[in-house]
Amino acid sequence: MNNKQILFLLLFSLAAVWSGFAQQKVSILGDSYSTFGGYMTPETNLCWYNGPDGGKKDNDVKTVEQTWWHQLIQEHGLQLEINNSYSGSTVCHTGYRKEDYSDRSFITRIHRLGTPDILLVFGGTNDSWAKSPVGEFQYGGWSKQDLYSFRPAFSYLMHSLRELYPATLIINLTNSELSPEVTESMEAICRYYGITNIRLKDVEKQHGHPSIKGMKSIAGQVWEVIRQEQQ
C-alpha cells in the first residue's frame, strides 16, 4: 500500500468518525432555562424565553441562537431531536403555592423525548424556588404520593430515564444558587445511578434566568463534559 492509499484511508476513517458524531441527536428535558417559544415539543409547553411567561422581563436573550442548547448544537455539529422544556415546571408533582403540577412535572414528560443519543436533563430550579417538599432518599417502590416530594421524584426520574433510554448518554445539569438540599440531593442521586451530573458555576442571570453571557457559560460547561464522556 503506497502513501497515497494510506492517506486516503486515514482521511476516509476520520470523515466517517466525524460524520457519525455530527449526526448525534440531542434531546432536552427542562424548565424555563431551556425554553424558547416556537421550538418546544409539544408546542403547547409554556415558554419563558420568547413566550408570555417572560417576554416582558428584563433579560437580554432575544433570539433562539442565544440559548445555551442552540449554541451547543450548532457549534458542535449536533442535531436537536426534541426539546421538551416547560417553564415553571418542577421535577416532582408539587409546584408553586403547593399546587399540583403533575400535568407538567419532569416525571410526567419522560416518555416524550424521542430517540436521542444524548439526553440533557436540566431541572430542580423550580423545586428549589417553590420550596417543594424535599422528602427522603428513596430508590424504589415509589407510590404516587412519594412523587410529590423532590428526592423520591428525582430518583424516580433518573431510574426511569435509564430504563427508557438505555443506549443514551444521560447528563444532568444542576443550576447554580439552588438550595443546599436540592443541590446535594441531585449530586447524591446521580452518583447512585451512575449518571454524570454537572454542577454549573459562573452563570450570569437577569431576572433569575441566564443572560446571553450566562447561556454561553452553560453551553461551554456542557460541551466540555460531553467531549470528555465521548473520548
Image (spheres, rainbow, N blue to C red):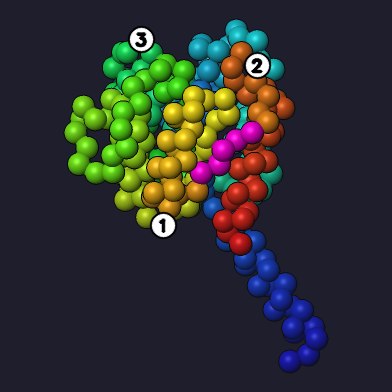
What residue did someone put label 3 on?
Answer: 97
Residue 108 visible, this orientation: no
Q: Which residue, given by chain and number where applicable, does mark 1 sit on?
A: 167
Looking at the rendered structure, the secondary structure element under dot 2 is strand
Residue depth check, mark 3 versus mark 2: number of the one nearer the observer: 3
Q: Earlier in the sequence, mark 3 or mark 1?
A: 3
Q: Examine the image and state in which quarter residue 97 appears.
A: top left
Quarter occupied by residue 101: top left
Viewer-nearest residue: 40 or 91: 91
Q: Check disc 1: other Cα within 10 Å, few if <14, some if 14-19, many if 20+.
A: few
Relative image position of residue 13 (x, y in whole percent):
65, 72
Task: Work out how far the residue at label 3 is from the one at label 1, CA to CA, in angstroms.
Answer: 38 Å
Residue 15 appears in view: yes
- Tell me the quarter of the picture where residue 74 sits: top right
Side of 58 where 49 appears, left or right: left
Find the magenta span and give its range.
197-201
Image position, residue 22 (x, y; %): 61, 54
Q: Label 3 neighbourhood size at 10 Å, few (<14), some (14-19), many (20+)? A: few
Write down the residue under mark 2: 206
Q: Which mark is residue 32?
A: none
Q: Residue at x 65, y 28 (%)?
A: 203
The extreme bottom residue here reads: 1
Q: Residue at x 61, y 62 (%)?
A: 231
Task: Check contact, mark 3 vs mark 1: CB within 8 A.
Answer: no
Give the side of residue 112 with respect to residue 19, left or right.
left
SS state under label 3: helix
In this view, the residue in front, 146 or 93, is: 146
Q: Position of residue 146 (x, y in %)?
A: 24, 30
Q: Give the Cα separation between the discs numbered 2 and 1.
A: 37 Å
Q: Residue at horizontal 46%, vertical 18%?
A: 129
Element type at mark 1: loop
Question: Mark 3 belongs to which amino acid?
Answer: Arg
